[in-house]
Amino acid sequence: MTREDVASALEEIGVLLELQGESSFRTNSYRNAARALSQMQEDLKTVVEAGKLGDVPGIGDSMRAKIETMVKTGSLPQLEELRAKVPPGLLQMLRLPGVGPKKVKSLHEELGVSDLDGLKAACEAGTVAKLKGFGEKTQQKILEGLRFLGEVGQRVRIDQAGPIGDLILDRVSKMPGVVRATLCGSLRRRRETAKDIDLVASADDAKPVMEVFCKQPEVMQIIGQGDTKSSIVFGMNVEGHKVVLNADLRVVPDDVFAFAVMYLTGSKDHNIKMRQRAIDRGLSLNEYGLTGGKNPLKCSDEAAIYQVLDLPYIPPELREDTGELDAAEKNELPKLIEVGDIRGVFHNHTTYSDGVASLEQMALACKKLGLEYFGVGDHSQSLKIANGMSIASVQKQHQEIDEVNSRLQGVQILKGIECDILEDGSLDYPDEVLATFDYVVASIHTHFGLTSEEQTARVCKALAHPATTMLGHATGRLLLRREGYKLDLDQVLKAAAKHGKMIEINANPYRLDLDWTHVKRAKAMGIPLVINPDAHAEAELAYFTYGVDVARRGWLEKKDVFNTRSLKEVVKELERRKAGNVAG
Ligand code: DGT
Ligand code: CA
Ligand code: ZN
């Protein structure tokens, strides 16, 4: 077993033990060990063979023995036993908001519920409400959660599907006989989540390519293996979590490649519009070609297809049928922002609140990514569960920032704060403390249950506060897990525009809070957007690239995003805002 396999096995043991009612002390020891392994740089097998596993912090004696067994034998009897004891459906139930291991355990033991379907039936029969510790409200929440899970189905987040897509693409591209290959579908359009991985390759002989595709070691099941199309179920560990999803590969002759790629990139609605455009010109467009009368037209790439239809190339992120053909027709397509345009980041955490790295480590990691500024935005005082900073702690942090900045070369730390918006819409520090920050990211972390009117008024009030620079976590959603809080986002955008405030695209791939449709609306209202990774560790700083994906899908150009500006420009603008010269 690889390091990642072992980490995911330990994680699984922790969860399974929790479902059996084990103490959190014991279950956490598995989680901590899994995390320690995930962050380990060395090769696990080498470390085990050298007898150095005990030196890794977070791994005690009994854990060391288990890890060694897994590395040496490829399995762990304890895990096999637990899997046999705990119905897999119980793990699914943990995806429901507000349902933890304790609740799952009592649903299973008291009501005999062992999967999501059974849980739905029990809720509909009203028996869940009668259980001790549940009640009508919880039952209602579970039903809402079940409906949400039903809608999202088996979709996978882009940070999990992406690496798998890249791995398969790399293998396919390198196969002998393959001329070209590319990812298609939602992954190429950079949606936040994907149902499956779509690939197209060109080769004279498809058969050997399909052979290799279907024989990859991670293939769990072959759904179909044909001469032009094959489908597999692929399972792989990504950062300690087992990810399972379908992958489809089409192999076509190279002169068909561009047509197949355009068709399979979609979106479906974009394809339909393109097909109609072809018809309007007396042509016929499909996944095999573009024909007019009897002559198939040659197009070696997608740009050539668009050109035949009198259009400039439309980037995949824009192909959602939200006006891209009209804009292309008028030559008004945006010049989309690129990853290389980002010069720094604003909302991130350090050990001062719930992050795992120091100010200096985070700043140096930014420098490595080619960024000029690291804006810290630790949690504010009332957010106790995330170790929010007392006023004394803020002062200490500012001193440390001054000290570190005096030593750092090529990167600078900015004094920000992720300030909680309290229940009544006020900010979490007195004005004189707020005035000590370079900027304030105002976010909601509590009282998610307010009515839409209450929540909207709360956020709008925070946006009206002179100290607020930008709104963080605009919706509070957790992708595929929890819908955002109830909120009238149009009102919020209006308030931001009125008070001249910025809005964050939270680039953490677990969240991607503001979705691309909102981004497009914000841009239309002239609101500056900011792409923030919300990093809690050095490696998470690179999350900003997912925010760039969202920004591109939202038609943003470099000028629309605040953190494409240089350190000098950013400091100047933040000072201007602090001086109270903000429009509105
Ligand atoms: P996903 O997989 O749900 O994340 O999203 P997509 O866009 O990857 O959808 P998928 O995998 O079902 O299909 C891939 C592409 O194939 C899709 O973006 C457009 C094209 N396609 C699929 N079905 C149709 C169809 O009925 N008509 C047309 N014109 N195109 C289709
Ligand atoms: Ca797809
Ligand atoms: Zn945060």
Image (cartoon, rainbow, N blue to C red):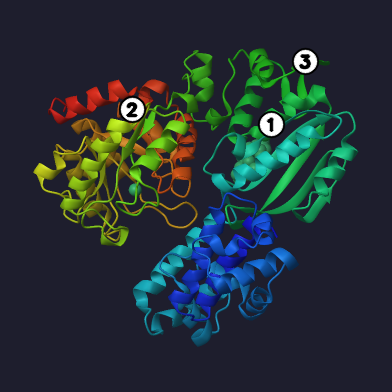
Q: Earlier in the sequence, mark 2 or mark 3?
A: 3
In x, y percent, where is residue 397? 24, 45
Name the N-terminal-most of marks 1 and 3.
1
Residue 146 drawn above or below residue 263: below
- Amino acid type of the residue tagged 3 in the rendering: Leu
Image quarter (top left, top right, bottom left or bottom right) of the C terminus: top left
Mark 2 to mark 1: distance in Å? 35 Å
Q: Which residue position holds label 3?
A: 297
Whether the residue under disc 2 has CB within 8 Å of ligand 3: no
The three-letter amino acid code for the residue at tag 2 is Phe
- Residue with the mark numbered 1: 263
Q: Is residue 57 above or below residue 285?
A: below
Estimate how packed mark 3 is, as few (under 14), some (14 to 19) or many (20 or more) residues with alpha carbons within 10 Å: some
Say which residue appears at 48% left-offset and 29% top-offset. Answer: 552
Q: Do tag 2 and tag 1 residues touch (Cβ < 8 Å)?
A: no
Which residue is at the front of the view, 81 or 296?
A: 81
